[in-house]
Each structure stands twice: as C-alpha cells, then as structure tokens.
Image: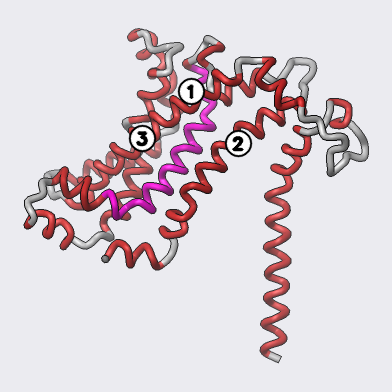
Amino acid sequence: MKAKSKKVFSIIKHIILITICIIMIFPFYWMIATAFKDTYAVYEYPPKIFPNPLVVSNFGKVWELLPFGQAFVNSIKIVLTVVVIQLLTASMAAFAFAKLQFKFRELIFLLVLATMMIPEQVIMIPLFQMFQKVGLIDTHLGLILPTAFCYPFGIFMLRQFIMGLPDSIMEAGKIDGCSYPGIFFKLTLPLIKPALSSLFIFSFLQNWNSFLYPMLFLNSQEKFTLPLMLNTFKGLYFTDWPVLMAACSIVILPVVLVYLSAQKYICLLYTSDAADERSS
C-alpha cells in the first residue's frame, strides 16, 4: 500500500509540474509561432497553434524596417560594460566587507544595503538634471555611469558567499607573501565563480531589459537600445505583430545563450558541490 501511494503521489506531482511548465513555456512558444505567421493569420479565429504556412521573411523585415542591428550593438556594448564593472566592483566591495577589518564596517555595509530601499524613480529627476548640466544626455556613458559602480544587491550576495570561505585561505596567502589584492584575485575570485555566474545572469537580465533609463536619457534613434527599438515597432493605429514577435525572439536569444553558458555554475551554487569546492 505504501509503495502504491508513493507511486500515485509521484505521478500526481509530475503531472502538476508538467502542467506548470507548459503554462510557463506556452507564451514563449506563442511568441515564436506568431513570428512565423503572416499578418492575416494572426487575426484568424479560432487561432492556429502551428503556423501554416511558415513565413520566414518577418525576421528579415526586422533588420530592414529600422536600424535594429545598430540597437543590438548598442545594447551589447552598454550591457557588457556595465556588467563587467558591476561584477568587479561588487566582488571587491564584498571581499572587503566579508574578510577585512576596518572601522565602521558594519555601519557602512548597512548604508549600502539601505540604498536598495530607495526607488529609482526618486533619483531619476535629480540624475537627469545633473547629467544635463555635464552633457551626458543622449550618450551611452549616461546609461553606464548610474548603474555600473553601484550594485548593492551584488555586494550583499557576494559578501554572504565570501563569508563562507575559510579564513585559513587568507592566512595561507599571507604566509606565501600575497597582498590583499593578490589574495582577492588569485585565491578568492576562483572560488566564487558560481556566485559570480549567477550574479552575471541577474545583472545581464536587469540591464538587457532596461527601458526606463534609456527612454529618459536617449533621444537619437541611432543610439537606441533594443527595448527602445522594440517600442518603435508598435504603431499608433496598427501594429505588425509577426514582425514585432520576430524582433522579440531575436532579443531574447542572447539571454538564453547567457543562461545556458553559465548553467553549470548556477547548478554548482545550489548543490553540495559548492561547499566542497569552497572548503577544498
């Protein structure tokens, strides 16, 4: 009886999980399916689950109608610059808060965390006025500076991870003649790859999907990022949904590739192997 009840429970659990997966995946499938339809097929009733015929030309129109390629390059440049600077500065600050002893360390850390409670809408107008005076409006540098050097969530996350590293690593580094930068770059960074990979994905998603700041700071279309360029595909009286969904499919592709490339480190972060790697 116990074996039968376990089997029934396992079947019910898998049915629920499969149903949840289908519910979550279906919007993405519908987006891709719409990208391969023509304009008339989008408004058919009842709607077709599988596009017939397949219209591949929608993906070509994405690059022809608007400077989508330039927006793609702009987004890659801005996001990679911001993410690299965020990971470097956040990991250095987290190492200092976790392993170094200095005056008012806990107070400063609390002040850093307090900045997470401030909505970005509060600082938006003062930031715009300040950047307008120094000539950073309608520049990519104006998008990079506000976020690259201040990432409280990353500092908090990496600090908690680095605190789990044994202090004997620092002591061994000091015995071998390493300075604090040497201990950080040679000993600490290799051990926090899982946390850095997870943080890379969080930061990449946040900056890749950023719409508010680019809309506020950018005016020239040739400097638009992908979220702004996607918004221009939407018309006032008519929207070409297949072309828009084709553009959305292209935009989401780098996010999928980033996740797949860092997946093994994320799995390592949430398994017991992470603890074994840190203590080795």
Work out how far the residue at label 1 is from the one at label 2, CA to CA, in angstroms. 20 Å
CB-based contact (under 8 Å), mark 1 and mark 2? no
Instruction: Report the front residue among 267 and 261.
Output: 261
Residue at 63% x, 32% y is 250
Label 3 CA crowd tier, 10 Å (few <14, some 14–19, many 20+): some
CB-based contact (under 8 Å), mark 1 and mark 3? no
Residue pointed to by mark 1: 213
Residue pointed to by mark 3: 84
Which region shows up in magenta?
A: 189-216
Q: Position of residue 267 (x, y in %)?
A: 47, 58
Residue at 68% x, 75% y is 10
Amino acid type at mark 2: Ile
Q: In the image, is residue 224 above or below residue 95? A: above
Residue at 77% x, 38% y is 33
* Picture disc at residue 252: 2
Amino acid type at mark 3: Val
Asked whether 123 falls inside the magenta stretch, the response is no
Instruction: Report the front residue among 56 and 241.
Output: 56
Per the picture, the main secondary structure of the magenta-coloured stretch is helix
